[in-house]
Structure formats: structure tokens, C-alpha cells
């Protein structure tokens, strides 16, 4: 290490290097006549030199030596400052860079063609939350020339003045005074964090300073768009199915496509807390504007505030990684899972499952397997949409029902119910179903009547779904551990923490976003959908300029060049 140099020498060295580089770079860009470049270079160099000076002071003596964590924090701070400087340069110099006068004239001409006269009014301040925080700028407003023109502007969707620059930047129709990128980051953080308050802290650390109420509003807006798109896809899938428009290949690929379904409870706000004047109780579910049928907090419902959320999962065996552990046992991990989830009627969840199945290759695999508990509505779903699939009653769920049944009929006598339930499960796993049913019936009607659960009827209802010997011979899974684990990781880890109670519509939107995040479909089904809704294509202007350079049409870099891709 070197001796610590005097403070004055460091300052002189910084100034000398900084001025020398500025002179060189400014000379290069002098033909373009853009003083913003010089300002930006000076600011960037100040940031870099400040970081270098801090590093130099922190590594010149053992007593003040910077740790690696300190150096890492210094680098991160330097990068953040450089990013902020670039963003400020673009926004603060926007009026000089984009040629606002030409934009204003163009907008006035467009409105004039529609018979609307406007006049240049004055500059108004505005701000917008970006990935780097809130940015402030000024822009010209156009004001209606008469009451008639004002009415005409309102008919076009304008609430007051017209801001041509806002329209050019694509932020005139955005809610919450946030860029779409900031909205999407907010949405993702709210999904990852286990509360809106923690999401607020995470966002503040990244420079986005908004309150938890705004985060909730963003989630509801983005989640609503994604949910509407999901509903649309489900309805289109059902329509194609009903019209027989699905075309599947004759030669199907080898392998198995798996579906699994399970439910978990979500705590919601009690109906009486939001609608105390209900005269009667009913379970009728109203239609939302999106076309989704779902219970909401203002609907008169049964007193229970818990609602079942149905989770569906699809994966194929070509997305399963197998390995042998140190004990010689084969282990597996599902690398890619795709989810849908819904709080409400089984009939609509069935449509979501059809849409999920189609996008994961249903009809293209030789075998399709549906693993679930023995619920009647799941058998009906399978018979309606997946008649060629083999439904398998989850063996571990079956054993759990056998165990609970035996505890009741043997009055919790462990010496009796444990061996009995083990024997029944062993017979069922060996596909000796008739023998198992016979042993259950041999308990006698008196003992069987002690349990409200009809185990015999349960097995007989699923008689075509319990041939476990045949399933294992084909290499099929017979348990639904994957979906039960997903219920915890996808839904419950965010929706079912202590003290949480959800508005049902908000819960559905959040769960829809969680399924997209955990399915690896965030870019396709969230980012793309939101940008399309607001009719904004990120990078469009950049790509245009890039293609111009490739074709030899070099875009002029002048003070009046329209550089607005921010």
C-alpha cells in the first residue's frame, strides 16, 4: 500500500484529470452544438472522481481500510448516481432535445382537422415516478379556444388541457403518475414481498418512493388487466373446444403430460362487515365487468369468511430432472410448472384448466394424467374436457381418508386403527380394491355408522382411478405432493400469513399475478399485456434509429433531433 497523499494533492489531481477529459470529449462533440453533452459529461466525471477519491482515501492506510462490503456499496452508489444523472439529462433537457415547438404545432394541426381550435397556453410542471425515482419537468399546455372546443376535447377523452409532450412520451394515459416499467416493478415487488408494507420498503430502497395504498392500487390495476386476459384466453379455449376446432397431431410425442388440482383456504373479509343490511343469505355469485364470476365482499354470503382457492398445475415429464442420491434412491425435481388459480365456481375453474392444458401441449403427448383428490367436480371436469386422460386418485390423500375414517370407527384406539388402516392402504396400493372394500364392509353397519364419511362410497366413486399397480408400471406418479407444495409456495406464502384478510376481487387479482410469477410467464403474460393495453412498445424509437443506422441512414444528432425513447 502507498502512503496517504495530502488532501490538496488529491483535489488538484481530480480537477486536472477532469478538466482534461472534458476538453477532449467536448472537442469531439463540438460540431453538434449540444451544450447538454458537456453538462452531462461534467456531472458524470464528478461522480466518478468522487467515487475514486473515496476509494483512494479508504485504501491508503490500514486504520481506514475499506472492507469488500464497503467497496461493493461504493460501486453500487456510483452506478445509481450515474443512472440518475443520465435520466435527469434526458428529462431536464427534453424541451431543447425534442423540439417542443414542432410537437405543439403538429398537435394543434391534428385537432384543427377535427374542428377543434386550441391555443398555446403556458408551461405547467409535472412529475412521474420512474425506475430511478420521481422526475420533474415542465411542458407546454394547449387550451381550448372556446366552450365548444372544450366540449369537443372532452368527447375525445381530454379532462382539461392538452399536453403534446406527455402524449409523445406515452405517459398521458398512465395511471398513478408512474411509468409502466415502474408499475411493473411495483407489482413484482408486491408479489415477492409478503405484505404491501414490506414491498413499500423494498421499493424505497430502489428509489421508488410510493405509499402502500398506491401499491395496492397498482396491483389491482395490473392484476385486473392480466386477469381479464386470462379470462379471455379461457373463454376462447372453450369456444374452440365446443366448435371442435382443436386439431391434434396423429403422431404424438412420447411422454406424459400431468395435471394436478388441489384447493386451499383464503381468509376474506366477512360479508356482514361490509354489508350489514343484508335481508337474506345466498351463495349466488354476481358477474363482474370483466365477465368473471366471483364472490366479493359486498355479496351476501354464508357467515364463514374463508373461501377455497382452487389451484391447477401442468407439467410434462420432459421437464423433470432425475438423479440418484447418496443412498442410491432415485430423486426428482420438476423444473417447469405452469399454474392457474381461481376463487369461485368450479365450472369457471374448469375453463381455466382447459386453457392451461392447451398452452402446455394437451393433445400432443401420448399420455395425459390428472392427479387429484376424489372430488366429484374434478371427475366431471376430466370427463368434459379431458376424456382421454387417466385420472389418478392421489394415493396419499386416499390413505389420509382411510386413517381418519379408522380413527373414528375404532374410537381412537391406536392398537386397532393403525394396523387396520395400514392393511387397507396396502391392499389398495396392490390394486386389490375389491378385497379392501370387502374388509371395510366387514366392520359391520353399527361400527360404520360411527363415521359420517362413507369410505366405501368414496372408493367406489373412484374405482377407475385407483389401479396403482398399473399406473406405477407405466411410470406414472400416484401422489399429488407437487401441487400441495405449490399451494404453500405459490398461494399461502403470500396470501395466508397471520392477520391477512382479503377483499375477494383483490385476492383473485393477486393470486392471478402469483401464478404468472411462479410459472415463469411474467414477461409473456404480465409485461407484454400491460404494455399492449396502454399501446406502448418499449424501445420502439430506439429500434427505429438502430435500423436506420444499419441501412446507412445515419440519424442526425442535432439539437432538434427527436430523442424521446426514455
Image: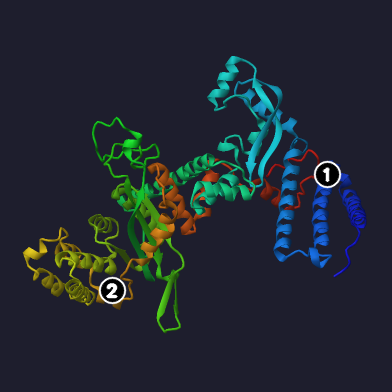
Earlier residue among tags 2 and 1: 1
State the SS at label 2. helix
Q: Report, in whole angstroms, how far the alpha carbon at label 2 lies from the one at label 1.
A: 72 Å
Query: Residue 539, percent across and down?
Result: 64, 48
Circle 2 sits on which residue? 471
Q: For the C terminus, give its image quadrant.
A: top right
Q: Residue at x 90, y 49 (%)?
A: 27
Q: Specify whether residue 240 is in view.
A: no
Query: Residue 76, percent across and down?
Result: 70, 57
Q: For the N terminus, give its image quadrant.
A: bottom right
* Mark 2 nearby-residue class (10 Å; few <14, some 14–19, many ≥20): some
Vertical comparison of 212 with 160: above or below: below
State the SS at label 1. helix
Towards the viewer: 337 or 115: 337
In this view, the residue farthest toward the front is: 63
Vertical comparison of 122 with 275: above or below: above
Circle 1 sits on which residue? 39
Q: How many marks?
A: 2
Towards the viewer: 514 or 248: 514
Q: Residue at x 32, y 38 (%)?
A: 271
* Mark 1 nearby-residue class (10 Å; few <14, some 14–19, many ≥20): few
Towards the viewer: 86 or 250: 86
Query: Residue 283, percent across and down?
Result: 26, 41
Residue 352 lies left or right of residue 85; in this view the side is left
Q: Residue at x 30, y 76 (%)?
A: 472
Residue 262 lies left or right of residue 281; in this view the side is right
Vertical comparison of 344 with 263: above or below: above
Towards the viewer: 58 or 49: 58
Q: Specify whether residue 217 is in view.
A: yes
Do callouts 2 and 1 mark residues in contact (Cβ within 8 Å)? no
Amino acid at each position: 500500500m502507498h502512503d496517504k497523499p495530502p488532501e490538496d494533492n488529491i483535489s488538484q489531481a481530480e480537477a486536472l484529470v477532469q478538466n482534461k477529459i472534458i476538453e477532449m470529449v467536448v472537442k469531439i462533440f463540438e460540431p453538434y452544438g449540444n451544450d447538454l453533452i458537456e453538462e452531462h459529461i461534467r456531472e458524470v466525471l464528478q461522480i466518478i472522481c468522487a467515487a475514486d477519491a473515496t476509494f483512494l482515501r479508504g485504501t491508503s492506510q490500514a486504520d481506514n481500510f475499506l472492507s469488500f462490503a464497503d467497496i461493493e456499496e461504493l460501486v453500487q452508489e456510483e452506478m445509481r448516481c450515474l443512472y440518475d444523472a443520465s435520466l435527469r439529462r434526458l428529462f431536464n433537457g427534453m424541451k431543447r432535445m425534442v423540439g417542443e415547438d414542432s410537437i405543439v404545432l403538429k398537435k394543434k394541426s391534428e385537432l384543427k382537422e377535427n374542428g377543434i381550435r386550441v391555443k398555446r397556453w403556458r408551461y405547467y410542471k409535472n412529475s412521474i415516478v420512474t425506475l430511478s425515482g420521481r422526475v420533474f419537468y415542465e411542458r407546454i399546455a394547449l387550451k381550448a379556444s372556446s366552450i365548444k372546443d372544450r366540449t369537443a376535447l372532452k368527447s375525445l377523452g381530454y379532462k382539461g388541457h392538452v399536453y403534446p409532450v406527455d402524449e409523445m412520451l406515452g405517459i398521458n394515459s398512465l395511471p398513478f403518475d408512474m411509468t409502466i416499467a415502474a408499475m411493473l416493478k411495483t407489482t413484482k415487488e408486491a408479489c415477492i414481498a409478503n405484505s404491501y408494507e414490506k414491498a413499500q420498503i423494498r421499493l424505497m430502497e430502489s428509489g421508488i418512493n410510493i405509499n402502500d395504498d398506491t401499491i395496492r392500487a397498482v396491483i389491482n390495476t395490473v392484476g385486473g388487466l392480466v386477469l381479464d386476459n386470462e379470462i379471455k384466453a379461457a373463454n376462447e379455449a372453450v369456444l374452440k373446444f365446443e366448435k371442435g376446432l382443436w386439431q391434434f397431431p396423429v403422431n404424438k410425442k412420447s411422454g406424459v403430460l400431468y395435471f394436478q388440482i388441489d384447493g386451499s383456504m383464503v381468509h376474506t373479509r366477512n360479508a356482514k362487515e361490509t354489508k350489514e343490511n343484508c335481508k337474506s343469505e345466498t351463495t349466488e355469485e354476481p358477474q363482474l365487468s370483466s365477465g368473471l364470476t366471483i364472490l366479493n365482499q359486498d355479496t351476501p354470503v354464508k357467515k364463514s369468511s374463508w373461501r377455497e382457492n382452487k389451484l391447477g398445475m401442468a407439467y410434462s415429464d420432459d421437464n423433470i430432472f432425475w438423479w440418484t442420491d447418496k443412498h442410491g434412491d432415485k430423486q426428482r425435481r420438476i423444473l417447469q410448472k405452469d399454474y392457474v388459480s381461481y376463487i369461485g365456481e368450479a365450472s369457471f375453474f374448469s375453463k381455466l384448466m382447459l386453457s392451461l392444458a392447451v398452452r402446455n401441449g394437451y393433445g400432443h403427448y401420448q399420455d395425459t394424467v390428472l392427479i387429484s383428490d376424489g372430488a366429484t367436480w374434478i371427475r366431471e371436469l376430466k370427463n368434459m374436457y379431458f376424456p382421454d386422460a387417466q385420472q389418478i386418485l392421489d394415493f396419499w390423500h386416499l390413505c389420509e381418508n382411510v386413517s381418519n375414517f379408522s380413527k373414528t370407527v375404532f374410537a381412537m384406539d391406536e392398537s386397532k386403527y393403525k394396523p387396520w388402516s395400514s392393511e387397507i392402504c396396502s391392499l389398495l396400493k396392490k390394486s386389490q380394491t375389491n378385497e379392501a372394500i370387502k374388509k371395510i364392509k366387514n366392520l359391520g353397519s353399527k361400527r360404520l355408522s360411527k363415521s359420517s364419511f362413507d369410505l366405501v362410497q368414496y372408493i367406489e366413486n373412484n374405482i377407475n382411478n385407483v389401479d396403482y399397480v398399473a399406473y406405477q408400471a407405466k411410470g406414472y406418479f400416484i401422489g399429488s405432493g407437487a401441487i400441495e407444495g405449490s399451494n404453500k409456495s405459490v398461494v399461502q406464502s403470500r396470501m395466508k400469513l397471520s392477520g391477512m384478510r382479503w377483499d375477494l376481487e383483490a385476492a383473485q387479482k393477486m393470486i392471478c399475478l402469483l401464478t404468472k410469477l411462479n410459472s415463469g410467464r411474467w414477461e409473456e403474460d404480465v409485461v407484454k399485456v400491460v404494455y399492449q393495453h396502454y399501446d406502448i412498445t418499449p424501445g420502439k424509437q430506439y429500434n427505429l434509429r438502430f435500423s436506420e443506422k444499419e441501412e446507412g441512414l445515419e440519424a442526425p444528432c442535432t439539437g432538434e433531433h427527436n430523442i424521446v425513447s426514455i
